[in-house]
Image: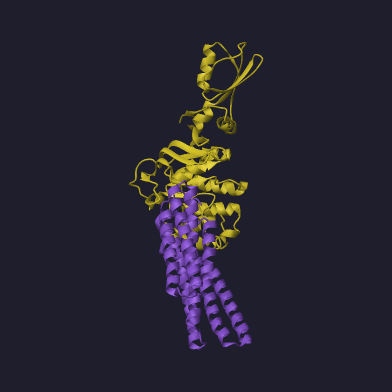
Amino acid sequence: MNAPHQKGAAVRLEGVVKRYPGFQLGPLDLVVEPGTVIALIGPNGAGKTTTLNCIAGLLVPDEGEVSVYGRDTDPNRPAYRADLGYVGEESGFFKRWSVRRNFEFLAGFVPSWSLQRSQELAERLALPLDQRVAALSRGNLTKLSLVAAVAHGPRLLLLDEPTAGLDPVVRAEVLDLLWEITEDGEHAVLYSTHVLQDVNRLADELVFIRKGQVAVHSGREALIDGWRRISFRSSEPDVALEGVVEHRRVGGDHQVVSNDAATTLGQLDRLGIEPTGVSRMSLDEIAVLILKEEHDVARSAS
Amino acid sequence: MWRVLRAELSYSRPWLLGAFGIAVGVAILITLIFRVVDDAEAIRNAVGLRAMFVIMGPLIVCFIVQGYRSEERRARLLLAGPMTPRQMALVNTLLPVAFCLVGLAAGSVSIGLDLVLDTGVSSSTLYLAGYVGSLLFMMAFLGLLVQESVAAYRQQRRAGAGVGWTIFVLAVLVQAGLSAVSVITQGQLGWPELFGGNLVIAAAASSASVILHSRRTDFTR
């Protein structure tokens, strides 16, 4: 089912627009290279799920092109689905059937879907094969979706908040499995999340989405390295600095947050101002500042 | 596509068996009641009623299954595989046909038994039983048409939604007209016209449903 002859990006979105009453996703451009793990981060209603649904072919964009390993995600030409596994909130299983029965159906329905691999994964994740899907806990439903999504060996995984609502033990199991899948460097993963601890463990790149637009697309390390909280003293009431996304002043004490610390510190140096403190910021702090509506932090770096 | 259809029929087997169980129970009850009445005309009517319940059972199950498939978001599972929207639409259309065939087969067995036992069944009673079955059959497709018209409207496909709703309104008017003429003329309108009307409506509704589903831009619901 895998198609090694299909070269190019794992996912390519070009000018993708999807309109709803009161909301528009895009225009969105995004490239996911094979072997890359990208986290989509954004508040509820920002467009994360819509983006994933467009890539999965569950939504047809109003404008633009979406391709997976070079093949358009046209629902009428489903060959692209061979390379795709999708874990969403709803997976459409036969709820009154057991997990095993659902697996047997998928094995006969989806080409290359391996019953043996699904059972091995289920065993490893302690997923009860003989329990009815309707009776599964939230954690087991996520495991089921994950096993169903990977059992045909797709090269691209789309995960819509895969760890939301999971207890820490199940969350760790799910992350372990994802880590193993991505370890070979061939699988591309695009996942949406609110849980930034997961990002630290898995993601190579971060895409922050706000109101249907990409606010920031950056490498994880580059992002964390670029942002700094900088304090300095100056009698000037307003010091114009590049890269500053937040500026607070109490008397002569200034505290700024910069998304381009090197530039900001260089400017301070040229102005002859000695920083009194420079501190790293956590990903949580950075995310909050990026996603706050009043901040304009549009920046793309990798 | 056939694999999916088989799976859906297999999935609905408990409901189907339950419906037949209820139908058989009702048939026995009707037989007992009409035996007590001990009227030859009533017994002839009972034959038609029994057949009607047996035919109706699977079609009522069809409505339940359509609801479950929508609630369980089956499209999302099927779109993980090699199905196209048109194939999914054909499965949606073939399901009521399959249930109807099951009902007709069971109804035929019921009527056949009555003929063998020589219970004096009249043809008009059997036509009535078949007519009620064809009404439900038609309604299953009108249900699909409404579902697709609502989806088209939500997906901003206003022209598609307009066509869907127009066919629905015309179907209701044709059905109402046929029924009214039949009542006013006191049976002058024959069973073939009434059956034919239902089948034409079912065919129009199913064709429109397939076309509307094939043009969906949102498969998340």
* Residue placed furthest toward the front: B185
Q: The yellow chain is which one?
A: A
Residue at point 63%, 86% (across, down): B36
Camera-side residue of B149 and A189: B149
Question: In this orientation, does residue A108 appear?
Answer: no
Camera-side residue of A203 and A10: A10
Quadrant of residue B26 within the rendered picture = bottom right
Q: Where is residue B160 in the image (x, y as percent from the top left)?
A: 43, 51
Instruction: Using the image, determine if residue B12 lies above or below residue A266.
Output: below
Q: Where is residue A268 in the image (x, y as percent from the top left)?
A: 54, 15
**Colouring mode (rainbow / by chain / secondary structure / one colour):** by chain
Quadrant of residue B204 within the rendered picture = bottom left
If the image is split into quadrants, where does the C terminus of chain A sit? top left
Q: The purple chain is which one?
A: B
* Residue placed furthest toward the right: A251
Instruction: Using the image, determine if residue B171 lies above or below residue B16.
Output: above
Camera-side residue of B173 and B17: B173
Question: In this orientation, does residue B122 appear?
Answer: yes
Residue at point 51%, 30% (across, down): A223
Q: Where is residue A22 in the image (x, y as percent from the top left)?
A: 53, 39
The mark tally for this picture is 0
Q: Position of residue A92 (x, y in %)?
A: 51, 56
Residue at point 52%, 78% (across, down): B51
Camera-side residue of B163 and B216: B163
